[in-house]
Amino acid sequence: MRDSAELRTALREATGADLAVAVSATVYDEIVRHEPRDLRANRFRRVTVDIRGKNFRADAWIAVTDEYA
């Protein structure tokens, strides 16, 4: 997912952001949505990641923030 156009686009479009994170649907469902520590589920948005050169397509969740700068 780190090579996905979706993640790169999200970071590029977020003015002032320093960090973009992509997690699998499983990680989001089992960890992020329960909001442990500083993870905030409302910062994530669902996307479909499609990396054609690697025959990879999956749902993922992306968050972009400058909070940790």
Image: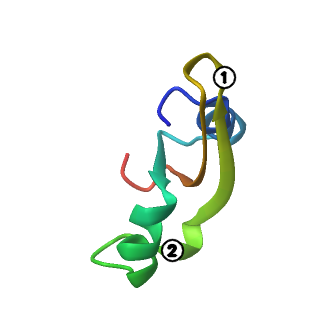
Q: Residues within 10 Å of mark 2 (few under 14, many from 20)?
A: some
* Residue 21 falls left or right of residue 9: left
For the point 39% across and 83% down, which residue is it? 34
Residue 24 image position (x, y, % from top left) = 47, 54
Query: Who comes first in sequence, dot 1 or dot 2?
Result: 2
Residue furthest toward the front? Answer: 55
For the point 69% across and 33% down, which residue is it? 9
* Disc number for residue 41: 2
Residue furthest toward the top? Answer: 53
* Disc number for residue 6: none
Residue 12 image position (x, y, % from top left) = 66, 32
Secondary structure category for the residue under label 1: helix
- Which residue matches tag 1? 52
Tell me if residue 50 comes above or below residue 32 in the rendering. above
Q: Quadrant of the C terminus?
A: top left
For the point 50% across and 37% down, which residue is it? 1
In front of the other: label 1 or label 2? 1
Name the kind of residue labelled 2 in the image. Ala
Residue 30 image position (x, y, % from top left) = 37, 74
Tell me if residue 45 comes above or below residue 31 in the rendering. above
